[in-house]
Amino acid sequence: MNSTLRGSILWVDDEIDLLKPHILYLEERGYTVEKVTNGRDALSATESENFDLVLLDQVMPGMDGISTLREMKEKSPHIPVIMITKNEEEWLMDEAISEKTAGYLTKPVNPSQIFLACKKILEEEKILEEKTASAYLEEFQAIESSLTAAREMDDWWNLYSRLAGWQIELDSRKELGLNETLDDQLRSANKGFVKYVTDNYRNWVHSERDNRPLLSVDVVPDKIISLLNKNEKILFVVVDCFRFDQALGILPMIQKLFKAEIGYHVSLLPSATPFARNGIFSGRFLSEIQDQEPEMWQRIANSESSMNLGEPDMFKNLLRELFGRDISHAYHKVSIAKEGQRFLTHMKEYSDLSLIALVVNFVDLLTHHRAESDVLQEMIPDESGYRSLVQTWFANSWLLEVLNTAAEMDFTVILTSDHGSIRVRRGVKISADRETSKGVRYKYGRSLQCPDKHALVIKRPADYRLPEMLTGTNYLIAKEDVYFVYPTQYHKYLGQLQDSFQHGGISLEEMLVPTITLRRR
């Protein structure tokens, strides 16, 4: 059977003649309706013809509705079925739900009820698509106006929040063809954001807390200490390289147990782990550590594996400094699933502690390994794929169980990151010597040169509270979606890095970091 206009319906009821007004009502609105009076005929009809929807009575001679439904689902599992019955017993409702019916109506029903139920199932996707397209196109101009009017960091955060929200919304509506328009808006927003940051960042790092946005170095004093002063127990989770859009993607899973208060902080520059995460756990800029604690600085600077090995000690010292005494706390860093499972197994042993800090490396590892793996490049072709993979990981991860356990233990959770990442699209040639750092989005070394339109060029690190890595150090920090490539084997590295996810530069995605407070419902 070929459906006309709106869809084809099979109606199964032993009293079908009494339903003529309902059938006429549906046909007048563009549906075709075929009628049968028993379960056997219904099964034969669905095997020989294609229907978009089945309306199924429960009480019929011979096979009842539930039996018919089960056989129908075995042979044609894709057909949505609405059960319609006089029986109001709860067991039947439970059976219908367990058999994954598309709906359940109790007789008597009027024609408009039937029409609404059919319309919801057969046309919901089309209606949602039309509404989504209309809403985004209406929002487009409002976003453009917000971009022009942005003056403060809160303005940029609100703008980025709207754009990230639309990224999530359009992930399931790719057929609308609006993703490219949204990408263009995000690139325009990044142009404005980069100018705002380059004009103001140097002043922020030399200002008191009240005169600047919340930076990495302010997270513990502002977010953690205030809660400890209220005698709240805290689980402080820092997911390395975790973007705001990814946080929005996993939030529905978290909100089943927690009420979420969504905020943000601004990653230090370069927006990379050695600078931003050290800033979080020490409460200081790396230049301060270099000047004030030479032994700690040597430990950081000389480490071949990680510049963040000093975090546990710096965190302990920061808590003592802010609180005036030692705070009962634990610090754990998890890089592989086995370590996460081990932490989860022993988590309740920490119930007497005031604070648990947990650093999670999965998203950062995913970002770095993508460039080396054909499989990951297939799975993460773009931002949407990246969000989807992070959601899949989180839904099946030990970390979700950790959050569930935190709810049981009545801990308040602060979920944040050190920085995000951006998909890079424009390779820019730079020249450098052998002592220059290896980062793709930021470099430090001697006599580094790059046009201002592509990078923030920092010739005096002290102006930005950055450490002097070598005598005469200067820094290049990439703007927007730029990445740095050496002239030697330029095309080879261009091919490897193009469209990869990197961090260390200036962009909304890297610098505006989600900081989410979760309290048990």
Image (cartoon, rainbow, N blue to C red):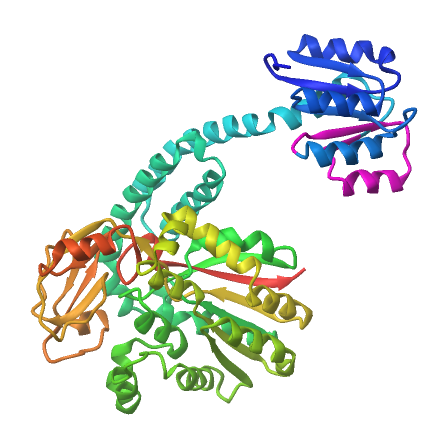
**Res 197 quadrant in image:** bottom left
Nearer to me, 19 or 240: 19
**At which x and y percent is residue 131?**
52, 28
Residue at 42%, 33% (x, y): give it: 139
Answer with left or right where residue 486 lies relative to residue 301: left
**Res 181 quadrant in image:** top left
**At which x and y percent is residue 107?**
87, 24
Q: What number of labels is visible? A: 0
Quarter occupied by the C terminus: bottom right
Does residue 77 sit above or below 213 in this rendering? above
Q: Is residue 87 magenta?
A: yes
Q: Is residue 389 magenta?
A: no
**At which x and y percent is residue 373?**
34, 59
Answer with left or right where residue 58 lies relative to residue 11: right
Nearer to me, 384 or 142: 384
Does residue 93 sit above or below 391 in this rendering? above
Residue at 86%, 29% (x, y): give it: 58
Asked whether residue 464 appears in the rendered view, the answer is yes
Asked whether residue 245 appears in the rendered view, the answer is no
Does residue 426 sit above or below 475 in this rendering? above
Quarter occupied by the N terminus: top right
Magenta stretch bounds? 78-104
**At which x and y percent is residue 209?**
36, 68
Residue at 47%, 56% (x, y): give it: 390
